[in-house]
Amino acid sequence: MADTILEIRHLSKSFGSHEVLRDIDFTVSKGDVTAIIGASGSGKSTLLRCVNLLETPTSGEILFHGKDVTGRGVNAPEYRSHVGMVFQSFNLFNNMTVLKNCMVGQMKVLKKSKEEARQTALRYLQQVGMAPYIKAKPRQLSGGQKQRVAIARALAMGPEVLLFDEPTSALDPEMVGEVLSVMQDLASGGMTMLVVTHEMAFARDVSNQVVYMSQGVICEQGAPADVLGNPQRQETKDFLARFRNS
């Protein structure tokens, strides 16, 4: 398919004798919002870290526009500029202002001029509602504000796909909404997203594909109405029941 961006084929990952991911297969097409759900320890974050090449898969392929990026000679920073990542713990540079945080990657990896990087950074900081804070350092920001800056930083690289690793799990409840709202706007704008999340309402209302993982394998995947509304596997039903009862 012409609009396929990422294909994950038979992906496995072991740490020593511990197999964390086993024979993972799925496809990400342009404009897809894929929610990856599952209990803690099911391999969700490791999967994202493999897709972003922060971890090296033990076996299998990750195809980006049909080219395997797990082979030798792949320029990982350049690939990551196309497949950006937003982390649970923000990963901002504490010694830099908000604006600089959003400029540095553009200048180093994309080789943009300082002025071009500045204009791009300002555009995305405006988009996520953080333009008034460009001179602030991360320590002066709330968790929700930090995460919005992290999203702007990822967007400034012009990625085709954005990976989110539990972007709201380190936030106070009242800040979760502001980050999910930004992500919802990105989805509405057609951004292709792969989101590891415990926010079932986001998975149900915003994603068009849900992947349920358990113990390192994909148990079920499909449309939100099918996986969340009519799960086929007992373990999926048990997992979802915990959210309905909470």
Image (tube, rainbow, N blue to C red):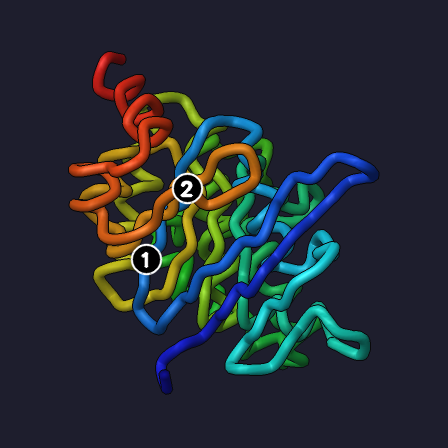
Mark 2 to mark 1 CA distance (whole Å): 19 Å
In-image side of 36 versus 141 (left or right): left
Q: Can you tell which mark lies on residue 107?
A: none
Residue occupying the far top of the picture: 245
Residue in the foreground of this view, choosing between 171 and 149: 171
Query: What SS does tag 2 mark?
Result: strand
In-image side of 53 versus 195 (left or right): right
Q: Kindly identify which residue carries mark 2.
A: 219
Residue occupying the far front of the picture: 233
Q: Nearer the viewer, mark 2 or mark 1?
A: 2
Residue 144: x %, y % from top left: 41, 35
> What residue is shown at x 32% (from left), y 22% (from top)?
238
Query: What SS does tag 1 mark?
Result: strand
Q: Kindly identify which residue carries mark 1.
A: 33
> What residue is shown at x 28% (from left), y 27% (from top)?
237
- The answer to which image quadrant residue 152 occupies is bottom left
Residue in the foreground of this view, choosing between 230 and 44: 230
Residue 189: x %, y % from top left: 25, 66
Please tell me how crowded label 1 is: few (under 14), some (14-19), or many (20+) other residues with Cα within 10 Å: many
Residue 47 visible in this rendered orientation of the protein: yes
- The answer to which image quadrant residue 126 occupies is bottom left
Q: Label 1 sits on what residue type?
A: Val
On screen, 180 above or below 73?
above
Q: Label 2 sits on what residue type?
A: Cys
In-image side of 121 versus 179 (left or right): right
- The answer to which image quadrant residue 186 occupies is bottom left
Please tell me how crowded label 2 is: few (under 14), some (14-19), or many (20+) other residues with Cα within 10 Å: some
> What residue is shown at x 22% (from left), y 61% (from top)?
188
> What residue is shown at x 47% (from left), y 31% (from top)?
143
Residue 12: x %, y % from top left: 65, 52
- Ranked by sequence position, the earlier of labels 2 and 1 is 1
Residue in the foreground of this view, choosing between 164 and 28: 28
